[in-house]
Each structure stands twice: as C-alpha cells, then as structure tokens.
Image (cartoon, rainbow, N blue to C red):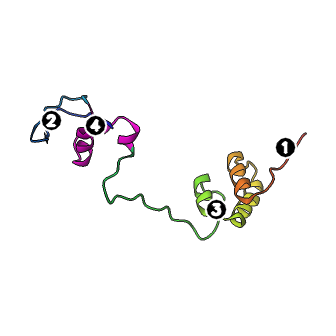
C-alpha cells in the first residue's frame, strides 16, 4: 500500500514523530496508518484507493420498481439484476429505441439467454 502526502507534517507513529515532506511517498503500515487517521494523503496504488474505513459500506443503489429504458445502462442493469424475464423486457424496450445501446443489448441478451439478433444487411 502506498500513499503520497499533500503537505508536510509529522504524525506520531510507532512511539515517535515521523517527519514527512510534501509530496513524499509512504508505503506499508505507515501508509495504512495515515489513511486510517485521515491524514493529508492521497492514495497511490490500487490497495490504497480501495481502502475504506471499518464499518463503511457503499450504499446500495435504489432500484426503481419499473423499468426506465431512458436511464443509464448501469441503472437498467441494476433494475434487471439477474432476472431473465426483466432482461427480456428491457431488451425489447432497448431494441425499440431509435439508437439502441449495443453494449447494453449484448449484456441483456446474455442475462435473458437470448440468441443475439443477426445484423441487418442493407
């Protein structure tokens, strides 16, 4: 785990003060300590970016009761979940649009277990 300081400061760590300069990169247990204490640091690697305080949970997105095909693809997929019937409903609605979102259509076809439609040749 690695973090980078946003300012110079000296945290009390491991029974002593540790002087840190601005823009200094810190790794390991000290980096974790700085994150845990809310120090003026920015995450550098994936582990530091993924760190969340204990008890911190990402809020569950609210899933609407009815399909809104004009919503973002993520919202449509959240509404569908892993329900093949909802996926089929959303797929029909998406394909009826003037410009269906091809990536969303593919994901809905996979969930609905529908064979992909053959490309229309003109």
Disc 4 crowd, CA 10 A, few/some/many (<14, 14-19, 20+): few
* Marks 3/2: CA–CA distance: 49 Å
Image vertical order of residue 41 relative to residue 59, above or below: above
Residue 75 screen position, x and y as percent? 58, 57
Which is nearer the N-term, disc 3 or disc 4? 4
Residue 7 screen position, x and y as percent? 20, 33
Which label lies toward us, 4 or 1?
A: 4
Which is nearer the N-term, disc 2 or disc 4? 2
Which is nearer the N-term, disc 3 or disc 1? 3
Locate residue 87 relative to residue 77 in the image: left or right. Answer: right
Mark 1 — residue? 119
Residue 97 located within the stretch drawn in magenta? no
Mark 2 — residue? 9
* Marks 3/4: CA–CA distance: 39 Å
Q: Say if mark 3 contacts mark 4, CB within 8 Å.
A: no
Which label lies toward us, 3 or 2?
A: 3
Instruction: Tell me which residue sits at (73%, 48%) in the image.
Output: 99
Q: Say if mark 2 contacts mark 4, CB within 8 Å.
A: no
Which is nearer the N-term, disc 4 or disc 1? 4
Mark 4 — residue? 28
């Amino acid at each position: 785990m690695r973090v980078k300081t946003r300012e110079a400061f000296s945290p009390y760590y491991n029974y002593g003060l540790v002087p840190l300069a601005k823009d200094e990169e810190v790794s390991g247990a000290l980096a974790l300590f700085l994150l845990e204490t809310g120090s003026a640091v920015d995450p550098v690697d994936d582990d530091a970016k993924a760190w969340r305080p204990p008890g911190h949970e990402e809020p569950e997105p609210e899933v609407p009761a009815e399909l809104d095909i004009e919503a973002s693809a993520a919202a449509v997929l959240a509404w569908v979940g892993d329900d093949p019937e909802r996926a089929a409903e959303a797929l029909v609605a998406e394909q009826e649009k003037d410009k269906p979102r091809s990536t969303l259509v593919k994901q809905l076809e996979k969930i609905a277990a529908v064979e992909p439609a053959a490309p229309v040749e003109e």
